[in-house]
Structures are given as C-alpha cells and as structure tokens.
Image: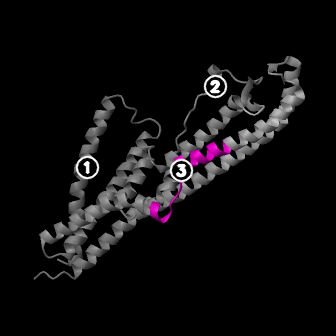
Amino acid sequence: VPRHQVILGKFIGGYLTILAALLISVLIGMVIVSFLSFPLFSGEVLSRLLLILLVSFLYLALMFTLGLFISSRCHSSLSAFTILLLIWVVLILAFPSLSGIVARIVYPVKSEQVLNQEKAEVRSNILREKGNELSEAIERAGLFREGVWTGSEEWQEYEKLRKPIAGKYEKRQAELIRQLEADYQREHSTQDRIAVNISRLSPASTLTYIMGDLCHTGLQERESFYQQAKVYYQRLDDIYYSKEWVDTFTVGKSRTYSIGKNAEGRAERKDLPFFTYKSRGLGEVLGRSIIDIGVLVLYTLIFFLGAYFSFLRYDVR
C-alpha cells in the first residue's frame, strides 16, 4: 500500500471517529435544549450553532493533524506523547497567558486610575478658571451684595452674563476630556491588538476569539457595546445632564458658594430612554472572524503536510 494512502487513511479514519462522537453528543444536547423551550430555531441561533460546529470540526482536524505530524516524526510513542504534552502546555497555557504580559512590556499604556486623575485635574482647573470669571459676572449683575442674595431681576441678569462664560469653559472641558478618553482608548486598543496577534500563535486562542464572537461574548461585542454606550450617554447628556448647571465661585478670600438651576426642557427621570444593545449581525461577525478562521485552516494544512512528508521519509526499520 502506498505510504500516502496510509497517512491519508489514518487521518480520515481517526478524524471521522472523533467527529462521530462529537456529533452524537451535540445532537443529544440539542434535543435536551429543545425540550427546555430554548429558542434554538429562532433568528440567528441555529445559524450560529452550525457555524460553531463547523469551526469545532476544523479545530479537531487541526489538533488531529498535529498529532499525526508528531507521531510521524518520532519512532517512540513515549517520545511522541512527551512532545505533544510540551506543545499542549506551550500553545494552550503559555501563549494565551503571556501574550498580555508581552504586549504590556512592548507597548505600555497608562492605567485607568491615571486617566481619572488627569480628568479630575482638568475639571478642577476649568472649574477654578470659570469660577473666577463668574465671580465678576455676579458682581456686575448685583446678585450677591454684602453677604445677601438679591432678587429675581439680578438672577435673570446673571443668567444672561453666565451663559457665554460657562459655555466657553464647558466646551473647553468637554474637548479636553474627550481627547484624554480618545487617547486612552486608542492606546489600549493598540495594546489589545498586539496581545491578540501574539496569542494567535496558539490555535486555542484563535478558536476562543471565533467562538466568543459567534456567542456574542467576544472582542467585537465588547467594542460594539462600548460604542453604543457612548452614543447612549451622549443622548442622555443632551436631554438631561446638560440641562442642569452648578456654578462655584469665591467671595472675598475664603468664602465659597455654589449656585445652580435646572434649565427648561430638561426631561423627567421617568421619561429617560432605556439603553438597548444591538448585537452585531452574523455577516459582520463572519467578516471580522475570517482572519481567525483562515489561521486555523493554515495551521491544519501545515500540520497535515508536515505529517504527509514526514511519513513518506519514515524509516520503518
């Protein structure tokens, strides 16, 4: 029997045996889930489940061809087992764990605590500068005289004076905060990409990324959730938070006061919109996961070709 037929038959026979066991367990699980009234056949659930199965079949083929490759290179089953155990430890345990550490060393970024400190410093500086200018507006409006608050006419005059002053500082503060957050997100996204690309050297990590995206728990979903949450918060700010203001100013050298008001048109709390998250569609997920699927296919081909050519040169003596 030609050697290429032997190695091919060994792959097909062994792989189909494992595949049959997996399919039986999956079918049993689907039957149990159906009896529990889980909407298995609604929406994209079944499509995602089938894709998860296909990716699992591909991963099994990858690991099986890896075993074939190692066994074709070794003359002793004990040596093959030892090498496979070492490879398993490196690919399954070491790479996924070390990728984040290496990424933090190669591309260090500031922590969230540092970001919060920088934002607090910006707010404090803006608040102090705004308070100094608003103190002059209060004096011009006559809102506070000899330690006593005056009437509504002075208040209306103060509101006219404060609007351009407060708007200038609030806009500046929003721009500075937005820039700090954008820099923070960009730096962490770069660090995450480095860690992900390093961990892709492990087929197990690649499988995890694909499965996570198909199950709405992956990196794509995290990014999508963050973007949608930003849009939602901006909407709340437009209809609620931006409709209230509080000014802090100093009278004399040490006496500090705060005054504020809820502006007209501010929405009631009971009328605030709820946050509704929209998951990424299956097509978009596949478009982003095609690289990871391609990595698994490439690994499978490399291991199979390695097993094929190694077996052709194998000395049976």
Q: Label 3 crowding class (10 Å Cα cut-off): few <14, some 14-19, many 20+?
A: few
Residue mark closest to the camera, 1 vs 3: 3
Sequence-wise, the earlier of marks 2 and 1 is: 1
Front-most of residues 231 and 168: 168
Q: Which colour scheme is used?
A: one colour
Instruction: Say the numbered circle drawn on residue 284.
Output: 3
Asked which quadrant contains residue 317, the reply is bottom left
The kind of residue tagged 1 is Leu
Image location (x, y in percent) of residue 212: 42, 48
Q: Can residue 71 be seen in this view?
A: yes
Is 115 a magenta residue?
yes
Residue 305 % position (x, y): 31, 74
- Amino acid type indicated by mark 2: Leu
Q: Is residue 216 magenta?
A: no
Q: Is residue 282 visible?
A: no
Q: Mark 3 or mark 2, which has the lower sequence index?
A: 2
| Marker disc for residue 22 | 1
Q: Which residue is drawn at 67% across and 45% down?
A: 122
What is the magenta range? Answer: 103-123
Front position in the image: 254 or 162? 254
Q: Residue at x 50, y 59 (%)?
A: 191
**173 left or right of 86?**
right
